[in-house]
Image: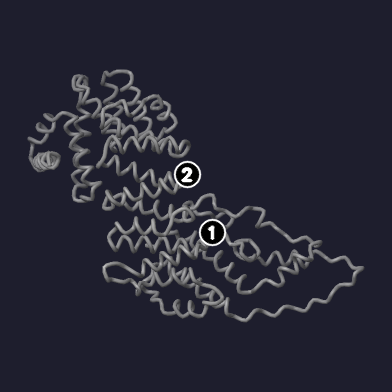
């Protein structure tokens, strides 16, 4: 209650400053830097909680705070609260030029100056120098606001090289600043790091906390990206019940979109169980409002259920999809699915009858090398039950959003030796339906890399 009243008074004051005439400059100068920075934090916390109408006020406050700190002199920074506010301003998205200039005019203790150097390096894109400057400083020993922001910055800097240490720092940031933009950002980063660590329990906990508290943050789309990627990466460790528990806290429209995105990625990656589950949940809807007519759900569920036994039903479903309601990317997926489903039911091409060679004749390697050259677009021969759950990457065309999932180079270069007649015989008896299905997955993989993994 006290916080709400303070926020209301602050907003009224800022509206007055924003709409007043020449007296604005005088009123702004009368405010101390720590007062402006505190107001900025309150507005940012409202934004994190879902108050998007406060975003223009954030821009105005950043402008006012920047001007006040540019004008601040050594006398202003004798107040320790103003120097801490300068550091918080820098870590809140402030202007690095302003921070550096203000620090040069301020006198403070060695620890605060070390933090200032780290913040300036961080803002100017020098992560190595920032880590070295901030490494010896324990955020838990600092005042609440400064410690929380410092823990968030250090956690972000260490996320790639020291993910376990980064998660500890992000936990400290959440502990020091609950219910704020700092906690929102710490939870969002924790979700992504937990995925890279393969930590399903941490991923589920951070996702649950984010959805409970910050689902309407303007940065929630970044969480959604990490959440969908995490469900795909950790699908063997996260139960469908746990996934349903997390999404049940979302509003119906967000839940549907999340399930559609999961279904699409899972279908393309060959995770038929997960794709079927997500498609069914997307179609099911909530509160009596089903999404069974959603063409995206029909498309993704079709991709996840294609087998030699269901191919005719799938072809019928694909034919009923309204192309006009799909994005360009999904229309390409539909075209590919229909084309290859047609290949599955087409009669196999007749094979030439092979005349056995006399025993005294050494088999020539040329026919087998020629056979290897007829591999599919992914550069791999169709092999039963050998489809990776990760997208296969076309050589020299890997999508930035899906690193480190290329098929091994040795697969693409494999040529059957002339001395391996048993292997060649096995390839001749490959079920044409299985081969077509393998080709389907790989072609869809390549299409998805070109179009992006998330539907519009």
- Residue 240, compared with residue 76, is above or below; it is below
Q: Is residue 230 left or right of residue 254?
A: right
Q: Is residue 68 left or right of residue 101?
A: left
Tell me the distance, in whole angstroms, between the alpha carbons under discs 2 and 1.
19 Å
The quadrant in which the C terminus is found is: bottom left
Q: Position of residue 172 (x, y in %)?
A: 34, 35
Q: Position of residue 173 (x, y in %)?
A: 32, 36
Total residue callouts? 2
Q: Is residue 75 left or right of residue 377?
A: left
Element assignment for label 1: loop
Color scheme of the displayed model: one colour
Which residue, given by chain and number where applicable, does mark 2 sit on?
197
- Residue 280, compared with residue 160, is above or below; it is below
Q: Position of residue 193 (x, y in %)?
A: 43, 44
Asked which quadrant contains residue 346, the reply is bottom right
Residue at the extreme right? 360
Asked which quadrant contains residue 17, the reply is top left
- Give yes or no for contact between labels 2 and 1 (Cβ–Cβ under 8 Å): no
Which residue, given by chain and number where applicable, does mark 1 sit on?
389
Q: Residue 65 has which mark? A: none
Q: Position of residue 88 (x, y in %)?
A: 27, 32
Which residue is rendered at x = 42% and y = 33% of the image?
A: 127
The quadrant in which the N terminus is found is: top left
- Residue 426, compared with residue 31, is above or below; it is below
Q: As rendered, which of 360 and 242 lies closer to the eye?
A: 242
Which residue is rendered at x = 63% and y = 66% of the image?
A: 384
Residue 206 seen anywhere in this rendered image of the structure:
yes
- Sequence-wise first label, 2 or 1: 2
Residue 59 seen anywhere in this rendered image of the structure:
no
Rate crowding at label 1 as few (under 14), some (14 to 19) or many (20 or more) other CA atoms within 10 Å: some
Q: Is residue 36 left or right of residue 110?
A: left
């Amino acid at each position: 209650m006290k916080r709400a009243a303070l926020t209301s008074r602050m907003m009224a004051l800022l509206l007055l400053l924003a709409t007043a005439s020449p007296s604005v400059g005088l009123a702004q100068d009368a405010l101390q830097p720590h007062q402006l920075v505190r107001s900025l934090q309150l507005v940012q916390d409202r934004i994190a909680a879902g108050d998007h109408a406060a975003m223009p006020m954030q821009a105005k406050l950043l402008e006012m705070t920047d001007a006040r700190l540019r004008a601040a002199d050594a006398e202003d920074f004798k107040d320790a609260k103003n120097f801490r506010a300068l550091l918080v301003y820098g870590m809140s998205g402030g202007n690095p030029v302003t921070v550096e200039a203000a620090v040069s005019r301020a006198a403070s203790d060695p620890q605060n100056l070390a933090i200032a150097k780290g913040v300036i390096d961080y803002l100017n894109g020098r992560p190595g120098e920032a880590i070295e400057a901030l490494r010896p400083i324990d955020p838990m020993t600092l005042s609440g606001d400064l410690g929380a922001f410092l823990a968030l910055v250090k956690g972000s800097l260490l996320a790639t090289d020291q993910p376990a240490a980064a998660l500890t720092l992000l936990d400290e940031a959440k502990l020091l600043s609950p219910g704020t933009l700092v906690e929102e950002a710490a939870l969002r980063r924790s979700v992504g790091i937990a995925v890279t660590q393969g930590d399903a329990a941490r991923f589920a906990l951070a996702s649950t906390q984010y959805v409970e508290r910050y689902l309407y943050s303007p940065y929630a789309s970044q969480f959604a990206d990490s959440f969908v990627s995490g469900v795909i990466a950790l699908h063997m460790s996260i139960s469908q019940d746990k996934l349903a528990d997390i999404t049940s806290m979302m509003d119906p429209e967000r839940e549907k979109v999340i399930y559609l995105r999961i279904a699409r990625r899972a279908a393309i990656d060959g995770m038929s169980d997960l794709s079927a589950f997500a498609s069914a949940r997307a179609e099911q809807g909530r509160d009596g409002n089903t999404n069974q007519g959603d063409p995206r759900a029909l498309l993704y569920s079709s991709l996840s259920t294609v087998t030699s036994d269901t191919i005719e039903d799938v072809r019928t479903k694909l034919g009923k999809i309204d192309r006009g309601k799909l994005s360009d990317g999904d229309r390409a997926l539909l075209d590919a699915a229909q084309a290859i489903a047609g290949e599955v039911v087409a009669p196999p091409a007749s094979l030439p009858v092979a005349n056995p060679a006399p025993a005294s004749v050494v088999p020539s390697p040329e026919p087998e090398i020629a056979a290897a050259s007829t591999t599919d677009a992914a550069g791999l021969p169709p092999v039963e039950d050998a489809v990776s759950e990760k997208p296969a990457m076309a050589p020299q065309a890997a999508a930035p959003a899906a690193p480190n999932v290329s098929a091994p180079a040795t697969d693409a270069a494999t040529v059957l030796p002339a001395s391996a007649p048993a292997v060649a015989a096995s390839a001749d008896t490959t079920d044409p339906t299985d081969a077509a299905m393998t080709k389907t997955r790989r072609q869809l993989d390549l299409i998805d890399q070109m179009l992006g993994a998330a539907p519009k």
